[in-house]
Image (cartoon, helix red, strand yellow):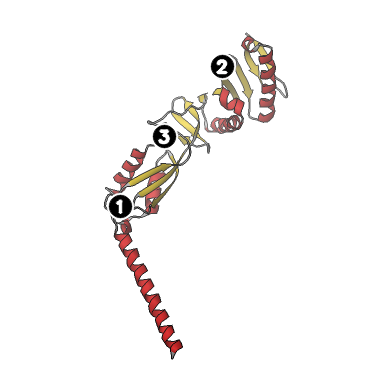
Amino acid sequence: MGIKYNYIKLIALMLVIMGLYAFSNHRNEQKAINGMAVEFVGDQNLYITQGAVNKLLIQKFGSLENVPKEKLVLNTMEKAIEANEMVKSAQVYLTVNGKLASKIIQRKPIGRIEGDSKFYLDDEGKRMPLSMSHSARVPIITGDVTGESLADVYEILNYINKDDFFRKNVIGIHIESESKYQLRFRTEQFVVELGDIDDLHKKFSNFKAFYAKAKRDKALSEYGMVSLEFNNQVVCTKI
């Protein structure tokens, strides 16, 4: 008899706990949003601002102040933010204190195209619009911009960004034609004829060896053109 009574008490206790949990969960869902917060992941400058994100959500879903939590569809909000061309990914969630929070990763520009159309090339090789909030300090791309040449430029930029010397010194890439590219440097007057994108590692290694020697000899200002187009050679033309 005692065992049966203990069993009944256990069931009753479980029902009470479940009831309290359901009541608490219902009360929590009924609570209204009491603010919005936006966090940008990473140390990039802002190509889309916190105000722009809040405005986007309000335009899409109306005022979110005092809206019960149960009426929010967080996945839909994430997709609305990710539809912005400056955003790579977004996570929308509710904080413990009742704020609607957005955690955003922006797209990252690695080159800026200056031609009939002006836009960025991002770190995935995709076109990215210019921002009204911030101008990225990235190499300027000029010349004969086509789909194929941009794919090559993307490969060149990826190599440049992996090397500290080139990342600090290359300020521009000029597309003479598909498979024929020039590099422009921050402090040097000469133009580097890169040619195509074959053997980039060898070409850049040869250039760094040339640059180090010419700098030691204080001869960098004597050159107007440096060509890396020929196999395992650096061919220079003096001014």
Left or right placement of residue 37 versus residue 228 in this view: left
Q: Position of residue 126 (x, y in %)?
A: 50, 37
Query: How many numbered circles does the render carry?
Result: 3
Q: At 32% from the left edge and 67% from the top edge, which residue is drawn?
A: 23
Q: Mark 1: which amino acid? A: Ile
Query: Comparing marks 1 and 3, which lies closer to the viewer?
Result: 1
Q: Residues within 10 Å of mark 3 (few under 14, many from 20)?
A: many
Q: At 31% from the left edge and 57% from the top edge, which residue is drawn?
A: 71
Q: Residue furthest bottom?
A: 1
Residue 157 falls in image quadrant: top right
**Location of residue 84 with respect to 177 vertically, above or below:** below
Circle 2 is placed at which residue position? 187
Q: Residue furthest right?
A: 232
Residue at mark 2 to residue at mark 1: CA–CA distance: 54 Å
Along the line of sight, which residue is nearer the eye, 148 or 14?
14
Query: Comparing marks 2 and 1, which lies closer to the viewer?
Result: 1
Q: Earlier in the sequence, mark 2 or mark 1?
A: 1
Is there CB contact under 8 Å for labels 3 and 2? Answer: no
**Location of residue 224 with respect to 165 vertically, above or below:** above
Quadrant placement of the C terminus: top right
Residue at mark 1 to residue at mark 3: CA–CA distance: 27 Å
Circle 3 is placed at which residue position? 47
Circle 1 is placed at which residue position? 33
